[in-house]
């Protein structure tokens, strides 16, 4: 008879193995699955068109922050894009560009998509893919209430009118030409500029989409939409009135996600967003500012935009000062290398090296002195992203552009300063055994730099003003901030008078400081003869 100890142990081993499996798998079973990080969607806006999307200083009425700034975007397209992102499973991240920059932002990879009443033309389809239209916006003519075309009920009634619209739009390239004998004026870059041109009698008619036009007349009592209906309007085709969201040509997954979300938003809901945006746009809340006097408007602008203007002035000063300093270093270095004489007694490799350096310096000076800073900014900022994949911050890109532009001019200035140093200085240095490099950097350059200090000051003052050109790459300097204020209130004279006064104050302070530096370096003007005993 077998004892208890002789019973088979296999069941016990199986039980032990099963318990170990349960214990080892328990942490996995009990672990809480971490939620996936939200997908970020970088969305580009123009930010200067009421009621579509505009810039403001707070987050009221559902405004969203502009990435990299302390400003916010608001408007019906902002509300609509928030809804689209929520339905598509994205978290929105807003960026602001001027109109031309917005058309380049998606192809260059600065943003994932763009929305600002963009009509998908054949040309734009070469660089962007477009979602299904989210809105069909009729083209309307905005005129002065007391003007000769206020009662125009057909395109024929606009015959001979001075008309214009926004740059790079179908309104300007196609529809404006349907006005008989139209006096076509140059296109303008933004809606606020168009409105001011109309109010100041520079033009008789401006063409806009209906939502934008309704926002304009809601804020400007002296303007109306010409009552053209039925066959008397611009007879725009369905394709000419469709607006859509632009995405990258190869981003098919995003295109599918956005189309799915757009199909879930009823048109009536979008119409309500438009009505709401017209109700809480800045001018509607401020009342009709066209009735304010000059001093009342200045007081309003300083009260609401004073800190914003000062911030822009700080950015302009930062770019001008450090751009001039870096440009001076670049200019002194390149000017020195281009001025080192090539001796026939030097080794062949050294002669070839100096000639190569001179050629590179000459090419650099020729290129950056021969092209405008604004063009350089567009090419470097957007070109670096599109060709090299470098996503440069606008502020640091602006500093780089100011520095290399200043360096090109400073190089020639330094070369002239070097040539003004007496030749005896070079001969004396050679007599005491100094090499050409030592002579240049220890003897010639210090004397040359002292003689060009007034020109360095001129470059600094010029850079304070020229930073305004960097607004094309959304650098938040003073001129850029001024455009934001003008875009909300349509009072260009008062806004840019304030901006001009700030620029004048900055350049005056810079001039006084530079004169103190020059006086310090020049030494005392009077001296006493010493008795040589």
Image (tube, rainbow, N blue to C red):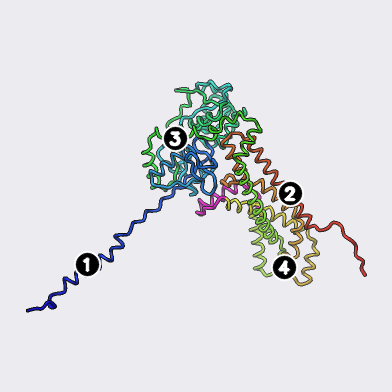
Task: Between residue 453 and residue 10, name the one nearer to us.
Answer: 10
- Work out how far the residue at label 3 is from the one at label 2, CA to CA, in angstroms: 51 Å
Q: What numbered label is drawn on residue 438?
A: 4
> Which quadrant holds the C terminus?
bottom right
Any part of residue 85 in sight? yes
State the count of labels: 4
Mark 2 crowd level (few <14, some 14–19, many ≥20, 10 Å Cα): some
> Of the residues tagged 4 and 2, which is closer to the observer?
2
- Work out how far the residue at label 1 is from the one at label 2, CA to CA, in angstroms: 86 Å
Query: Which residue is denoted by mark 2 in the rendering?
Result: 511
- Work out how far the residue at label 4 is from the one at label 2, CA to CA, in angstroms: 34 Å
Q: Secondary structure at mark 2?
A: helix
- Work out how far the residue at label 4 is from the one at label 3, CA to CA, in angstroms: 70 Å
Q: What numbered label is drawn on residue 273?
A: 3
Task: Between residue 358 and residue 193, name the one nearer to us.
Answer: 193
- Residue plotted at (50% across, 32% down): 212
Mark 4 / mark 3, whichever is N-terminal? 3
Whole-percent x and y of residue 458? Answer: 72, 50
Q: Which SS does the magenta portion mostly show?
A: helix
- Residue plotted at (65% across, 54% down): 322
Determine whether label 3 and label 2 are within 8 Å by CB.
Answer: no
> Of the residues tagged 4 and 3, which is closer to the observer?
3
Q: Secondary structure at mark 3?
A: helix
């Amino acid at each position: 008879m077998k004892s208890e100890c002789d019973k088979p142990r296999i069941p016990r081993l199986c039980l032990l193995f099963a318990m170990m499996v349960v214990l080892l798998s328990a942490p996995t079973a009990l672990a809480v699955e971490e939620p996936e990080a939200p997908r970020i969607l970088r969305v580009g806006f123009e930010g200067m068109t009421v009621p579509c999307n505009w810039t403001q200083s707070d987050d009221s009425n559902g405004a969203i922050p502009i990435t990299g700034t302390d400003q916010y975007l608001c408007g019906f397209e902002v509300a609509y894009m928030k809804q689209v992102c929520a339905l598509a499973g994205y978290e929105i991240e807003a960026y602001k560009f001027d109109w031309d920059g917005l058309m380049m932002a998606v192809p260059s990879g600065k943003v994932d998509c763009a929305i600002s009443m963009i009509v998908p033309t054949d040309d734009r389809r070469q660089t962007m893919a477009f979602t299904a239209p989210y809105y069909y916006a009729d083209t309307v003519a905005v005129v002065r209430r007391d003007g000769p075309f206020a009662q125009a009920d057909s395109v024929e009634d606009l015959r001979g009118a001075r008309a214009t619209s926004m740059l790079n739009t179908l309104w300007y390239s196609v529809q404006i030409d349907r006005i008989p004998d139209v006096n076509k004026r140059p296109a303008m870059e933004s809606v606020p500029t168009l409105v001011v041109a109309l109010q100041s009698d520079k033009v008789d008619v401006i063409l806009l989409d209906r939502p934008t036009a309704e926002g304009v007349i809601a804020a400007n009592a002296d303007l109306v939409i010409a009552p053209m209906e039925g066959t008397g309007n611009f007879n725009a085709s369905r394709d000419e009135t469709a607006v859509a969201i632009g995405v990258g040509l190869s981003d098919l997954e995003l295109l599918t996600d956005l189309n799915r979300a757009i199909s879930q938003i009823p048109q009536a809901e979008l119409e309500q967003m438009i009505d709401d945006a017209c109700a809480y746009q800045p001018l509607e809340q401020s009342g009709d500012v066209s009735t304010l006097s000059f001093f009342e408007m200045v007081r309003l602008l300083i009260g609401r935009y004073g800190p914003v203007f000062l911030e822009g002035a700080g950015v302009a000063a930062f770019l001008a000062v450090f751009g001039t300093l870096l440009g001076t270093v670049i200019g002194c270095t390149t000017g020195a290398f281009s001025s080192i004489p090539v001796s026939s007694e030097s080794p062949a490799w050294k002669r070839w090296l100096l000639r190569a350096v001179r050629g590179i310096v000459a090419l650099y000076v020729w290129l950056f002195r021969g092209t405008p800073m604004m063009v350089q900014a567009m090419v470097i900022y957007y070109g670096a992203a599109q060709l090299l994949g470098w996503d440069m911050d606008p502020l640091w890109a602006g500093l780089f552009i100011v520095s290399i532009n200043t360096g090109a001019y400073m190089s020639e200035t330094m070369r002239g300063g070097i040539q003004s140093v007496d030749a005896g200085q070079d001969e004396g240095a050679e007599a005491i055994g100094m090499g050409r490099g030592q002579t240049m950097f220890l003897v010639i350059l210090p004397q040359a730099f002292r003689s060009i200090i007034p020109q360095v000051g001129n470059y600094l003052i010029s850079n304070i003003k020229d930073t305004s050109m960097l607004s094309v790459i959304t650098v938040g300097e003073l001129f850029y901030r001024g455009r934001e204020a003008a875009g909300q209130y349509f009072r260009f004279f008062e806004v840019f008078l304030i901006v001009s006064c700030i620029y004048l104050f900055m350049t005056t302070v810079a001039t006084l400081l530079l004169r103190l530096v020059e006086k310090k370096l020049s030494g005392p003007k009077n001296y006493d003869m010493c008795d040589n005993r």
